[in-house]
Image (cartoon, helix red, strand yellow):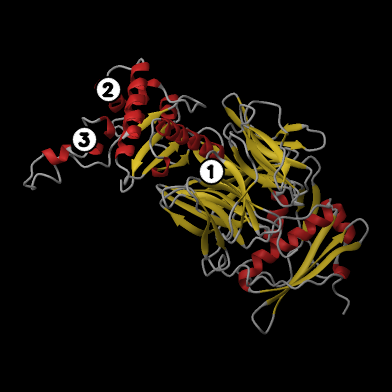
Amino acid sequence: MIFMKPFRLLSVSFLFALLFAPAALRAALTIEIVGGGANQIPVAIAPFRAEEGLAQKITPVIAADLARSGLFRVVDAGGMVPVPYEPEQVDFPRWRARGAEAVVIGSVTLLSDGRYDIRFRLMDVVKQTQLAGFVYFASAAQLRLTAHKIADVIYEKMTGDAGVFATRITYIVKKGKRYELQVADADGYGAQTVLASNEPIISPAWAPNGTRLAYVSFEHKKPVVYVQSLTTGDRKAVANFWGSNSAPAWAPDGRRLAVTLTKDGGSQIYLINADGGGSPTRLTSSSAIDTEASFSPDGQWIIFTSDRGGGPQIYRMPASGGQPQRLTFEGNYNVSPHYGPDGKSFTFMQRNGNRFHIAVQDFATRQVQILTDGGIDESPSFAPNSRMILYATKVGGRGILAAVSSDGRVKQRFTEDAGDVREPSWGPLVNK
Amino acid sequence: MKKIFAVLFLAGVLAGCSSAPPLEQEGAKVEDRVPSAVPQEKPADSGVSSKPLGTSTVAADPLKDPANILSKRSVYFDLDSNIIKDEYKPIVSAHAKYLSQNRGKQMRIEGNADERGSSEYNLALGQRRADAVKQMMQLLGAPVSQIETISFGKEKPKATGHDEAAWAENRRGDIRYQGE
């Protein structure tokens, strides 16, 4: 059988053991698209053979993912009889007549061990060739994830950028006096509370391999940095020094964290081991505030917020410490820098008058682009493909999450049923 | 002994230099502005009425005596500022003196910031305010080993509004003693 070119086995059980525990999947966050890309790619998605009986259908999830990105227009696949499941069944001229550039076909087969065999092909309607074809073996609980993986392949083939539908996000929900650290799929489904506290939680940061979170918890009536495993739930205070401990940022090696400590007086940036062992290495030495470190993807640089020049601005220094250079010059309040995963730009929060916007600055050209106009937009972080930026904003006094494409064209809003959502962070690509 | 003398002298100089009104009045002013400044403290007579020694022992805990300046715990700051205004200097100096005379006491100064801006930069601004209070106490001879400064940033606002009055209320350093 000459089925798939690439062949990929989906093995996610260990990673998702905690997060995909028995709780039913639901959309805690509903995503609404506010704006769309200029040139949307028309793609048709035919229903997969035998997906009708599944509790979680595959193709509606793929269609929702692609539409939400703002880069695709999902072409109606209804009334195409017979429905094509194999390449030889695709009537290319008819799909072309509907305006589709590509068509997705596939099938689902229940295996004797209870898992599903899910295979799909992405067909180029114009060239009448196969662009991609994969097979996945997944349990019933992994059907949504499998659909996201398929959407990732389609996104990558059609746009040239990695897809991020199978990634996860984290954020804090405040419900009354209770704070919940939650992790959800990038489409808002499957939200799980990984930590609940009656004291604030801020600044969650993903370990580079997506299996741990670092964050700041005030459960001991002061800010302390913790690292928590998402697979076992184990957590440990990794920075609990005299004074305040905050702003964790993972080094790309996943073994060290940059944190802000005040143990020696003033808020300064230090390097610590992510397991909490050893003693901190001090990276900055100023009499000003130095905080909010973010590593470059190659681990060579740290960008951070400092008010050594008066107001808070963004600086860059070697990751081992050394002379910082100022990066931002527009405006008198530029904070919360996050390095882009492609290393070419950083996103940050800028104050203009009484309004706060999310902006990006290119490292090479120093050009700044303001991406949002929400008024109180905070905590930006890049999607792992550098194409989208997740941030927190306020609507009617309540915190919600939103995302904007790094060119400012596509805008999404995540609405949540209850509570006040803040401090989001977009997780890394995993199993890639 | 010499040290304590120095502290008293400095405190005197400080009070003398400031244009603030007399201590009692000053304390009352702070109390008016922040009616809930000492909400966790028990009323002076509640735990005491059944004790045979009478109320004089209650007055002996100056930290809980509403008539004593040591019951005043909050220092307020201007926007983007960590400068301790004259009106709060008597409170800071009273606690500095108390700490140096009570070497077994541990103090935590909690800095706070208003809600505008990033969580982490605000955390650092709150820390800077707490540190400013500590530095003044140190100048007045208080042993720094007895003082930890931490920050809540904008995470635990006392006033939950979104206007200048609420923001002013939240730009604050609070003095707490261990066990409080």
Q: Residue at x 33, y 38 (%)?
A: B99
Task: Tell us which disc is closer to us: 1 or 3.
Answer: 1
Task: Tell us which disc is closer to us: 1 or 2.
Answer: 1
Q: Which residue is mark 3?
A: B65
Q: Which residue is mark 1?
A: A264
| Pointer 3 with pointer 2, Cβ within 8 A | no
| Residue A282 pos. (x, y %) | 62, 47
Check the image and name the residue furthest to the front.
B2
Check the image and name the residue furthest to the left.
B52
Q: Residue at x 59, y 62 (%)?
A: A275
Chain ID at mark 1: A
Callouts 3 and 2 in the same chain = yes
Q: CA distance from mark 1 to mark 2?
A: 34 Å
| Residue A396 pos. (x, y %) | 50, 35
Q: Is residue A113 left or right of residue B70?
A: right
Q: CA distance from mark 3 to mark 2?
A: 15 Å
Callouts 1 and 2 in the same chain = no
| Residue B170 pos. (x, y %) | 42, 32
Check the image and name the residue furthest to the bottom.
A112
Q: Is residue A216 left or right of residue B165?
A: right
Query: How busy is the neighbourhood of tag 1: few (under 14 within 10 Å), some, or many (20 plus)?
Result: few
Chain ID at mark 3: B
Chain ID at mark 2: B
Using the rendered view, name the quadrant where residue B38 is placed. top left
Q: Amino acid at mark 3?
A: Asp
Q: Is residue A135 left or right of residue A311?
A: right
Q: CA distance from mark 1 to mark 3?
A: 34 Å
Q: Amino acid at mark 2?
A: Leu
Q: Amino acid at mark 1?
A: Asp
Tell me the tag on residue B23. Answer: 2
Position above or below: A83 against B52: below
Is residue A58 visible in the rendered image? The answer is no
